[in-house]
Image (spheres, grey):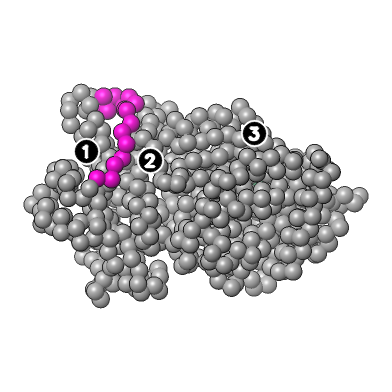
Amino acid sequence: MSPELSARLSEMEPVSAHPMTEAAGVEATSEVLRLAAAVFQDSEHPMAHAEEWDRRLQEGRGVHFVVRQEAQLVSFLTAYQSNNVQRTRATDDADSNCFHVWMAGTHPDFRGRGAMTALFHAAEKSARSRGLRYMTLNTYPTRFPDMFKLATAQWEMYEDTMGGRDMKDKDVGKVSLIKLLTCAIALPWAALALVARRPRSAHARRGVACRDGAEQATRTPILAPFQTDPPRVLLVTGATSRLGTAFARRVAEERAFDRMLLCGRNRRKGEALAAELAASGIHADFLAVDLSCQMEVRSLCSQLRGRPIHCAALLAGVTAVPTREETPDGLELHFGLNYLSRFHLVTALLENFQAAGTEMSPARVLLCGSSRHRGEPVLGFSGLGPALPVGLGDFKDMQLEDTNAYRPWKAFGQAALCNVMLAYELQKRFRDANDHIAAVCFDPGPLMTAWDLYRREENRWPGTGMAQGDKDMLAYFTRVVQDPESAAELPIALATTCSAMPSRTPQVGYTGYWELGLPALSKFPLPWNWSSSYDEELWSTLWDRSERLVQDTLHHSS
Ligand SMILES: NC(=O)c1ccc[n+]([C@@H]2O[C@H](COP(=O)([O-])OP(=O)(O)OC[C@H]3O[C@@H](n4cnc5c(N)ncnc54)[C@H](OP(=O)(O)O)[C@@H]3O)[C@@H](O)[C@H]2O)c1
């Protein structure tokens, strides 16, 4: 490395961005080999011989993905096609085809700056464009802990049975990792493992909150944006506040999408976030819209006509508003904003999703819900709470207009229940492999908004006589309240990880709702698992009523 560049990096000043390139394999090998020797300090290793690299690259249509700084190669990843995933714990597919990451490394002076993450993304995009189903990687956790940490954040361990041999070399601590690139074989346990293994928060991990100059500087992007063709587009609502902002920032960091459409009311916050994401290399636009107003939702959908959308994360919503409020259309606020506007948006954008989804990677619809869909909480257990009108098939009282009908958690829970049922009904209607849409509802877990509300005297759990005991309960429960970055972990996994998506099985509903980082695996009528959300008749009644309600609302407002 040149002394000037070295000096500049040690001061951690912003460095200029350089594009990542996918170089032709053979031509770049000697340059990559020089870097590999510096990275592994192991030039005598047989793998260091150019002939071996060339042979693998030629046989497997291999490529080097590289990151350059001032024309100098600083990071590389070499991958080639292989059919060595024969029968793994992760899949029963005997004809699997994978992109095998054979060698990868970053020059020691450039580590911790996101280069390897970007290379992983580039390799994954290349694997997807080749129509491959898996990516594999072998590594040594003790020798390369950073690589192991990075890979296990999104990949899972498996036993590679290549040629009948067990490749998990326990003596030298080698582990084999796999990433599924298709939704056709989504095993909940695999997704669970992925979620559980994700680092708590990239912000915490990368020291974003620290005032320390060096850590601040790690935020400076060193890579120019790379883009797929067509670009992968993510639509986010509610990005102007906690959960949504944390979600948008992390997804941008992961570079899982090329473009973001941020929808919300608060123009100042929305445009500031779009500018922040643009500075990190993501093309982001803010679209101002009041989602509680169905006319505005309609005009948003018209603006988006013809644009493929790969994922919609519908996070905008209110939580347990103390007294009954109405949307401009006269609907109860939770119902109108948290549910009906999402129903309207999703059904109006079906063509956008179908244009973006593929069999390998269906477009995703993520609906923010809550465990409160099981009813109002009693002693902290929502499953034991009184049923919600919609859950009882009482569609007359959906707006909670009757005297004394309104309660904050009832209204919030009912809107959440409608979201769960919408996800199940979407799964049912678009189960066909040609539809290319996957829908999931999830509970992000308790966020501070809700607990701020619990603190208010007038908003204590109604009818439970717990006003006195509340303080102790709160002292306990506020410990489990999460920061938005942690709450965003689940939707991030659902948006970016293939195996976290529902499989196309006849058992609709099994993986269409997630909470506590897990898919709802069981329909057993256990008290805490009780839910009217499993009633298929209710799904379609709700769908029909919602369609009519949207039409009526638009009719009255026009
Ligand atoms: N708090 C919890 O414990 C909890 C639990 C489960 C689920 N949730 C759900 O998680 C989501 C995020 O929660 P949070 O705590 O991050 O909430 P938050 O900080 O209050 O953020 C809500 C977001 O929704 C947007 N929004 C509200 N009304 C809107 C409207 N009429 N049109 C467009 N956008 C609107 C807000 O935009 P503005 O900036 O313009 O206001 C904001 O971006 C919500 O859907 C909530 O219901 C929360």
Distance Cα–Cα, label 1 vs label 3: 42 Å
Q: Secondary structure at mark 2?
A: loop
Seen as rendered, the residue at the extreme left is: 44
Q: Is residue 431 above or below residue 467?
A: below
Residue indicated by mark 2: 226
Q: Secondary structure at mark 3?
A: strand
Q: Residue shown at 81%/64% (left/top)? A: 393
Residue indicated by mark 1: 73
Where does residue 391 sit, x and y in percent of width and height?
Answer: 77, 63
Residue indicated by mark 3: 288
Q: Amino acid at mark 1?
A: Leu
Is any atom of residue 339 visible in this view? Answer: yes
Q: Secondary structure at mark 1?
A: strand
Rendered-image quadrant of the N terminus: top left
Q: Amino acid at mark 2?
A: Phe
Q: Earlier in the sequence, mark 2 or mark 1?
A: 1
Q: Residues within 10 Å of mark 1 (few under 14, many from 20)?
A: some
